[in-house]
Image (tube, coloured by chain):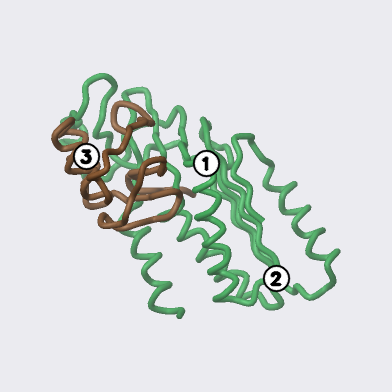
Amino acid sequence: MIKVQREAFDASDLLRDFTDGCCKSGYEDGAIVSFTGLVRGQAKEKQTKQKKEGLVLRQAQDEAGPSTGPSGSVTTLELDHYPQFTEKMIASFEQEARRLWPVNHVLIVHRYGRMAPGEAIVFVATASAHRKDAFEAADYLMDRLKTDAPFWKKEKTATGEAWIEPTERDYAAREEWSHSKK
Amino acid sequence: MAGGREQQKALSKDIASIGQLLAQLQQENPMLAQALQHVSTNYVVNQEICHADAPIKDTDEIAFLPPMSGG
């Protein structure tokens, strides 16, 4: 099941309901894995855009250290999405996960809109007979969400704002699945 | 879309692909066309990911998506 929503959610409630749902449909599941992603309080990378000034590199940041270093506390994270298409793409990731692993139940909840640090942004749960399948399917789903889900994140700090793109590590994680699974 | 989320355009009959649409935009708004042709842009026609040579027609919904990042 997939939910793309603006509203905040409680990951504990989602996990409890997911677990109840798995048990109600019989006792075929021996493993449930869940992942909750939270909005981090520290900016992901240096800011390359400052408000009203277009492209301005933060010189002080460059001088201070590596370009990937943090650039202050995040005040809000804003997520844009593409209604219907976002749900459709996430549904294709679920379909692929079900093809690759014998998972019996999948739940993906993803928020859009404005969020504060500490708020849950994404929740993924998988259930299968054995733990390895549930772990791997959840990991795969998160890797696909990080690089291929139609969301666009803008991180705001006291000094400006920046669009956040997947890192090389995110893309590498996704690529690994294409080598390890057919 | 750069400078706005959406634009409605009437498609002339000689434009039959995303590539040709980008060529027209190049005349009208070179900066926008350049941004839309970035190597990481995904082309989406009626909510299906496509290549630049994918056919398009009037009334189609065409989206140019910058790098996506959820989670």
Could you tell me which secondary element the residue under label 2 belongs to? strand
Q: Name the residue under label 2.
A: A104
Density class for disc 1 (Cα within 10 Å; few <14, some 14-19, many ≥20) is few
Q: Is residue B14 left or right of residue A4?
A: left
The span from disc 1 to disc 3 (Cα, nearest Å) is: 22 Å
Q: What residue type is labelled 1?
A: Pro
Pair 2/3: label in front: 3
Which colour represents chain B?
Answer: brown
Density class for disc 2 (Cα within 10 Å; few <14, some 14-19, many ≥20) is some
Chain that is green in the image? A
- State which chain disc 3 sits on: B
Q: Toward which corner of the image does residue A56 lie, by quadrant? A: top left
Residue A72 image position (x, y, % from top left): 35, 31
Q: Which residue is depicted at the point 66% across and 57% down?
A: A107
The span from disc 2 to disc 3 (Cα, nearest Å) is: 43 Å
Q: Is residue A107 left or right of residue A122?
A: right
User: From the image, which quarter does the N terminus of chain A lie in?
Assistant: bottom right
Do the numbered discs 1 and 3 sit on residues whose CB atoms are within 8 Å? no
